[in-house]
Amino acid sequence: MDESFANLETSHLIGSVPAVISDDNKSTNVHTASVNEGPSANIQIFPPHQGNNNAKGYQTLDTPTERPEQQPSNSWKGFFNVYSYTQYFDVDTDVVVNRLMSSLYPTSGDFFNKIDANPDMYGLVWICTTLVFVLSSLGNCATYLVKKRTDGEAPWVFDVNYINLAASIIYGYAIIVPLAFYFSLRYMGSRADLLRFWCLWGYSLFIFIPTSLPLLIPVEFLRWVIILSAGSASSCFVALNLRSYLEGSNDLTVVVAAAVGLQMVLSIFIKVWFFP
């Protein structure tokens, strides 16, 4: 090595560690750990520990890392924590598509078996939001076509109230109706799961999304056939799955009949208000 580099004072170099001067001979000594020191050696981790103000020195490997605290979902604080609801939206595209296809084939009656491991709220939110948009937009298109067909010179104005009406009816129906069935079945002593009911009724509304497009055809008889067919399919989907889920329960016929009636009332309401 070149002697010019050996004569440099290391204490003036950037990033160098100052030497420790002993009280005996004032000489520079660098303390090095022995290789044979054994398992008692404590490996240090840089930078110094900053999580605890009372702690001194550097972190060791035994120091646990800090993580953001999450409120437990089983306490009342869990209702106000976003992390408590992430599990209900943890579904991939294949699962959602499979459940959507099941809602289009109502005679199977095995929807609760498919969602038993992971009932989701994603379908409820996504389907209701899409249906609100479809009804408000296509409903205005239907009124426009009817207006132009009857009187081509009459002015037409986009009705913004369709959005408020569709959001109130669809979201209210998808949330309140399963909630009412849940409390009613609990009162009658039958087993009921609110999350599974919300999932069932949410996916039952999917059939009204594709059937809203042919409702633009300005033929009144054909419109009634389309909407009643969609309502019947949605009613069968809810009724057959409720029957398989509540098999052996008391007053099962009344519960199924009420579910069918409410689904048919919703389909007729969609026809009368959005596609007159």
Image (cartoon, rainbow, N blue to C red):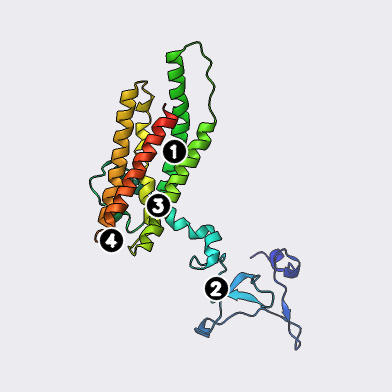
Q: Decide: few, some or many residues near mark 2? Use Cα within 10 Å; few <14, some 14-19, many ≥20.
A: few
Number of numbered markers: 4
Q: Which residue is mark 4?
A: 250
Q: Decide: few, some or many residues near mark 4? Use Cα within 10 Å; few <14, some 14-19, many ≥20.
A: few
- Sequence order check, earlier mark of 3 and 4: 3
Q: Is residue 185 left or right of residue 136?
A: left
Q: Quadrant of residue 65?
A: bottom right
Q: Nearer the viewer, mark 3 or mark 1?
A: 3
Q: Which residue is mark 2?
A: 64
Q: Which residue is mark 1?
A: 130
Identify which amino acid the numbered label 1 is placed on.
Thr
Q: Nearer the viewer, mark 3 or mark 4?
A: 4
Q: How far apart, in angstroms, are the residues tagged by discs 4 and 2?
A: 54 Å
Q: Nearer the viewer, mark 4 or mark 2?
A: 4
Q: Secondary structure at mark 1?
A: helix
Position above or below: 31 against 132 = below
Asked if the residue under mark 2 is in contact with the one under mark 3, i.e. CB atoms within 8 Å, the reply is: no
Q: Which residue is mark 3?
A: 178
Q: Secondary structure at mark 2?
A: loop
Image coordinates of residue 254 in percent, x first then y, are 30, 53
Q: Nearer the viewer, mark 2 or mark 1?
A: 1
Q: How far apart, in angstroms, are the residues tagged by discs 1 and 4?
A: 36 Å
Identify which amino acid the numbered label 3 is placed on.
Pro
Q: Secondary structure at mark 4?
A: loop
Position above or below: 218 against 10 = above
Of 23 and 232, which appears nearest the observer? 232
